[in-house]
Image (cartoon, grey):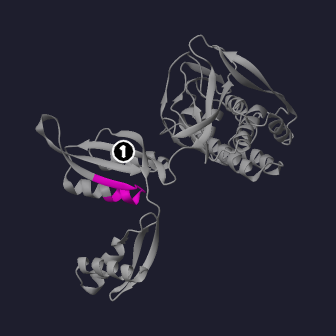
Amino acid sequence: MKICYLDAFSGISGDMTIGALLDAGADCDGLIRALESLGLGASFSAEKTKRKGITATKFHITGGEAKSHRHLSHILKMIDAAPLPDAVKETSTAVFQRIGEVEAAVHGIPIEKVHFHEVGAVDSICDVVGACWSFHSLGIQEIYCSPINVGSGTVETDHGTLPVPAPATAALLIGKPIYSRGPQTELATPTGAAIAVTLSRGFGPPPPMKIQSIGYGSGTKDFKEQANVLRVLVGEDSRAPEAVTISVLEANVDDATPEVLGYAMDRLFEAGALDVTLQPLLMKKSRPGVLLRALARPEDQERIAALILRETTTLGLRIYAAERRIQPRRFEEVETRFGKVRMKVSEGDGAASPEYDDCRKLALETNTPLKTILAEATYAYLKQSR
């Protein structure tokens, strides 16, 4: 699997993303043809530049049809009508839909009435479509992103002077890791934030990968404190075939009742947690406590974290990425004298175990000890597999 890691140590914008992907090997001529097919009348070019001694690619968008306002529906129709690959249309539409939802929430109006200003301008339409096309050009299947440096200070917009991150950018980055370091200026734009949030599978350190190419996309300004570039790492997923990246969420709890913890565990499973455990601890001041640990898919991380904070008494939790090894397995059904039971069978050594929920259901329905159902299912599988 080919993956891309966005290293937003100096922020992220649409043109920086395109520049970095071109620098990493995306087809520049193909990109320009794709953007020209939008019919916006703009011209495009890419040039090599340097930021704090780092060679980077700067992508330029010049001129184009001028409109003061555009609605989301107009932009989506424009993308749909262009001769672009279906995957590019899908991701571009998803990014603009995300921006539209955030703009509607920020201004307190229905999404149909949102007027796009900076985001609806020619350069931003081309930024979104261009970034999505460049990911497609490189054959990227999964995207990950670092915590985003958003900058500080203020920014001038059509709505006047606003704090950094701008309201739309801040809303887009809810639940995502951000920080502020370097010059007092806007480092993460709404377009850049929307691309990262919509397309990334997760935020954090780089996933295990074998790097094939590295690209640097240049911003317009040249800072004294740091290189104004977005770095992308492109390569092959180096995880074992049965390995997946997960988020581990932990909290030490010393003031919750067993009922509360048991209920929280049930809710976490219902919310999509891969696993939840409760482990006894001896905490500070010699208090007995519990370590609650939940495993979650990266895309479910923020929902699981919010649920832990809501359903337990903890005031904080730890989150880190881990690699989870999963033995490939298949399900086979066996017939017992009590009824049918599914067996989980390892593709590796062929080891099998009865599905607990099936056995529990039969035990209750037939008033038979659970251990008997488990033994019967195992025997039936062994007999069947000979």
Q: Which residue is depicted at the point 61% across and 48% down?
A: 1
Q: Nearer the viewer, residue 156 or 294?
A: 294
Residue sitting at the far bottom: 337
Residue 268 magenta: yes
* Residue 16 sits inside the magenta stretch: no
Range shown magenta: 266-277
For residue 82, above or below residue 383: above
Image coordinates of residue 112 in percent, x first then y, are: 68, 48
Q: How far across and how far down the image is residue 283, in percent?
A: 17, 39
Can you give x and y, in whole percent of width and height, for residue 34 in the image?
A: 82, 41
Count up the numbered dots.
1
**Left or right, residue 292 beside residue 220:** left
Residue 246 falls left or right of residue 236: left
Residue with the most extreme front position: 386
Instruction: Identify the secondary structure beneath mark 1.
Output: strand
Residue under numbered circle 1 = 249
> The residue under label 1 is which amino acid type?
Leu
Which quarter shows the C terminus?
A: bottom left
Residue situated furthest top in the rendering: 224
